[in-house]
Image: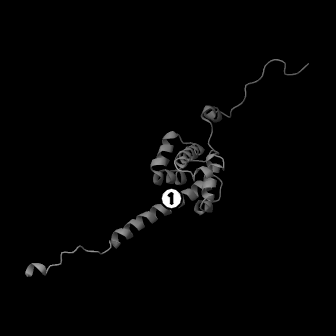
Amino acid sequence: MAQYDVPTYPTTEFPWGALIGILAVTAVFAVIGIAAMWKIFTKAGEPGWAAIVPIYNTIVLLKISGKQTWWLIMFFIPVANIVFMILTLAGLSRSFGKDAGFTVLLVLLPFIGYPILGFGKAAYVGPGGIPRRYADYTQQGGYHLPQQHGYQQGY
């Protein structure tokens, strides 16, 4: 009868320590993400508080990225939202003078990419950034149309 004295049923206690640890790490990432978005919005001349307002922060992000506001509708359509978010992040990285490699960083590791944009030395260059074909000309004093030759004085 001694073999029945030891309980053999599994324990049913909840792992509260693991849950609290996961929630703490998630809260740290959330605070860093909000602070980074706040700084990104401030660098772009938008109000920083917009980073904490749902839906409005997406509208401001679209504006900073040089995209149209109607794209917000596309974020509610499955699969299309992934494509349009990648395009928005590409516009965001161009808006801060970054290239396609930085867009990949924003897509795959946003908890690293957003703080680099917000707290780093990246400067906002405008919605959607400067088109690459004119980038060299703007560093040399601006892009100017070539002078027109011929009958400029009229008849």
Mark 1 belongs to which amino acid?
Gly
Image side of residue 18 versus residue 79, left or right: left
Q: Nearer the viewer, residue 83 or 22?
A: 83
Q: In this view, does 45 lie above or below 145?
A: below
Residue 154, given in percent of the width and then of the height, sits at: 89, 21
Query: Which quadrant holds the N terminus?
Result: bottom left
Residue 104, given in percent of the width and then of the height, sits at: 48, 44
Q: Name the residue under label 1.
A: 33
Image side of residue 54 versus residue 6, left or right: right
Dot 1: few (<14), some (14–19), or many (≥20) neighbours within 10 Å?
many
The quadrant where residue 2 appears: bottom left
Q: Nearer the viewer, residue 49 or 2?
A: 2
Q: What element carries label 1?
A: helix
> What residue is drawn where x is 48% and y is 48%?
107
> What residue is drawn where x is 62% and y is 60%?
50
The quadrant where residue 6 appears: bottom left
